[in-house]
Amino acid sequence: MIVDLESGMKVVRPQGKAMFPYSNSLYIDDDIAVMIDAGAGGRAYQDIQSEKVDLLLLTHNHFDHVNGVSFFKNARLLASEKEAPGYTDSEIYASYAGYELWEELMDSPRQIKFGSLSAMPEDIPVNPGFHHIALNGYLQDGDIFDLGKNKLQAVYLPGHSHGHFGFIIEQSGIMFSSDIDLSPFGPWYGGLFSDVDQLVDSVNRIIELDPDILVTSHRRVFYKGQDDIIGSLKAYLAIAMEREQLIWEVLQTPQTRSDLLKRDYISHYRHQNEYTLFWTRMMILKHIESMNKRNIITCEDGLYRRA
Ligand SMILES: [Zn+2]
């Protein structure tokens, strides 16, 4: 489904729900035709001429954003330099998921591959896991792409992943914030290089940019005036802060790392499986790291306590 914005800008929405393995794309039909992200599925991309896309910009290296790169045969492909090794090296790609911590967090080896948990829909051309993607160059914070009528700016928004980018077209106030997605379940920062403090800074950067139209990867389009975009961004951040508060409350008494990680007081997911449990624990770990760094907790002799 296509949602027309203005001056040739279109949100390409998946035919199914914009949930994993799908995500929204933003298409800018200008002198240089740009597609942001490649996870809307083959059926959705039938509504545009994908062979005419000159430039494909990937916000980050998560499967639901990159699985459709093969639809854009004539496009130059750019993504963050920080995540570039993960596009060409399967071991580095796997390391981003943090599976080296699986046994510690889950008490048993990882047995089921994530890709075998559910079958992919027909219009997702590849299965989850590593796929070699050859980039033609890298995105840098502040890069401006002069497309003809529109100027598109890259905005580095790390936290969800270490190379996560958004994009803004300042003259029309349209921002694509990717996986800073205003999910009612709150932000996700369950990867090895995810960082909750960076995530907070990134959301605050969007608040400062104060977009008129916010397009995220997994929800409908938000319009200033109709929607309280700033309030929604603050509420989204508040969910991360509530998670920290829950950890703080548990630390009324000293806790081991294992006690803190395996107490399932934070739930990000409606349906649980061993992967959602793993990510929940990874996110608790990210909070512990953040609280430690900010000296509001300490760790001595394996026990965490309030500072
Ligand atoms: Zn993501």
Image: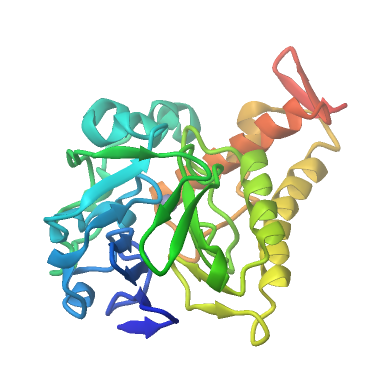
Q: Quadrant of residue 22?
A: bottom left
Tell me, what colour scheme is on the image? rainbow
Q: Nearer the viewer, residue 16 or 53?
A: 53
Tell me if I can see residue 183 in this picture.
no
Q: Nearer the viewer, residue 12 or 301?
A: 12
Where residue 31 sits: x, y (%)? Answer: 28, 67
Q: Is residue 169 above or below residue 108?
A: below
Left or right: 112 in relation to 171? left
Tell me if I can see residue 45 in this picture.
yes
Where residue 258 sits: x, y (%)? Answer: 61, 29
Q: Nearer the viewer, residue 282 or 129?
A: 129
Q: Residue furthest front?
A: 148
Where residue 88 sits: x, y (%)? Answer: 22, 32
Image point (74%, 54%), residue name: 242
Left or right: 300 in relation to 180? right
Left or right: 105 in relation to 73? right
Where residue 214 sits: x, y (%)? Answer: 55, 71
Q: Where's the C terminus, which quadrant?
A: top right
Q: Is residue 179 above or below residue 216?
A: above
Image point (45%, 28%), residue name: 101
Total numbered labels: 0
Q: Residue furthest bottom?
A: 226
Q: Is residue 267 above or below residue 196?
A: below
Q: Nearer the viewer, residue 256 or 34?
A: 34
Image point (18%, 76%), residue name: 43
Q: Where's the N terminus, which quadrant?
A: bottom left
